[in-house]
Image (tube, rainbow, N blue to C red):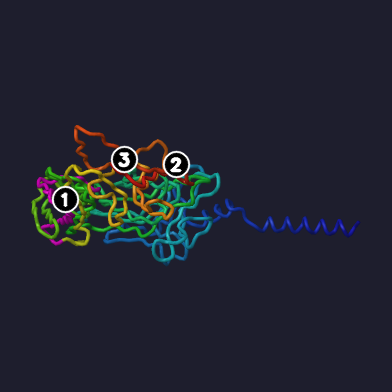
Amino acid sequence: MKKLVFIVTMIALCITVWAQAQPRKDELAKKENQSVNIQKADNTKKGNTRDCNPITTFPWSESFENLDGNMPECWTQEFLTDNEMTWRNLEGAPDNVWPMAAQSGSYRAVMITLPNQEAKTKLITPRLDLSELTNPRLRFWHAHYWDYLRVYYRTSSNGDWILLDEYITGGTFNYTQRTFLLPNPSDDYYIAFEGETRGTTGRGLNIDNVEVDDFVGYVDAELVNIIAPVAGIYQNLNDPVPITLSIRNNGSEALSNFNIKVEVNGVEVIDETFSGEPIPALSQAEERTITGTLDLSAEGAHVITITLVTAEEDQVPTNNTRSVTVTNNVCTPVTTFPYTENFDDGTTFPPRCWSITHVDGTRWGRNTNPNYSPPAAAIGRNQTTNTISLLVTPQIAIPSTGTFLLEFMSQFIQEVNYDGINRFAEVMI
């Protein structure tokens, strides 16, 4: 009996010693928080503020490398909640942080999310003297999984924080670079990255490669998309086709001095000088419709190539051009009977002069199966409930006299992950 008591006692002792030797995750975070910064000025701010002269040489950048795991000098932190969770200079992926690495190099600034502990902390740059910069620009990379990030600036050490942008929906799961022109530059300027951890739902916030420079003399007109005409197969395009573009100005000055050149099958048909409102520097993509229109009434495929040509040399000419292909079928009404379509032609779908009216969730296409008779079929897959998609025949001129019969074969199959599949194996009139 004594032996049994001794064994149980030893097991209990081992468990106690092991438990005491393992720091709790929140306790570990608190200890690390205490060692991150060397000076705490008051109850809401702390950071390394030794010999912090303003930054006056640009471009200025911070990669968070070569700091022996410490935060950069002269960066400070401001706590907005009682839970004082700090930004830390980290390598790898401790505490389930996502992403698991820096954007480049080995280190980045990280604000960790702990279970059931929501916190909000600003990571603040050193004082920046932007008074001599013509067009100060901020660039940085960030990634976070469900936690929130907001970016602020202020024009003096005692000024109000002004929101530049926020990322508070879903998450930015992969590193993304953000670019801003900094408003109201001054000689006492600060930028803050405010992290808000979401307790159990988040996996931390990551900031890397912060840069401020003077953004001047940079030209980049980007043709993001050709909104119209839309690529596809059409019937009887007899009316002029408008041209609508999505254009983004990635340059340092407002964009107004450029031409829009349009080619159809390699032949230039439009060279129009842009005459709309200037597109602001570093703008979001803006939709613009030009004056010229296209004649696509001829039978066949029309490869439409559109290029933005700037007066000054474009720094990124590879994003100036986009193309779409519009095919026009000149269709006349069906007047010869019997008319049959069995979908055997595997080179194109829908068949010539047929059309499809799409509704989200439904797709029409061609499929073959040896169990079909004949083996080819038009197949409509419906992935959501209560949706409609029309596969439309060519125009059929049915005489006013006589009797005409529509015959078709169909099959309905319920499949996993789909609401239904409609197959039409043959249509004959």
Distance between the alpha carbons at the discs numbered 3 and 2: 16 Å
Q: Residues within 10 Å of mark 3 (few under 14, many from 20)?
A: some
Residue ID at (43%, 65%) = 106
Mark 1 sits on what residue? Answer: 254
Number of marks present in the image shown: 3
Distance between the alpha carbons at the discs numbered 1 and 3: 45 Å
Query: Can the viewer see residue 118?
Result: yes
Tag 1: amino acid: Ala
Q: Which one is earlier in the sequence, the residue at label 1 or at label 3?
A: 1
Q: Could you tell whether 4 is left or right of 352 in the image?
A: right
Q: Nearer the viewer, residue 311 or 223?
A: 223
Do labels 3 and 2 touch, CB within 8 Å?
Answer: no
Residue 181 image position (x, y, % from top left):
25, 51
The circle drawn on residue 419 is 2
Mark 3 sits on what residue? Answer: 390
Q: Residues within 10 Å of mark 2 (few under 14, many from 20)?
A: some
Q: Nearer the viewer, residue 405 or 230?
A: 405
Furthest toward the front, the residue is 402
Q: Could you tell whether 14 is left or right of 389 in the image?
A: right
Extent of the magenta region: 284-313
Tell which tag, 1 or 3, sits nearer the viewer.
3
Residue 67 image position (x, y, % from top left):
43, 65
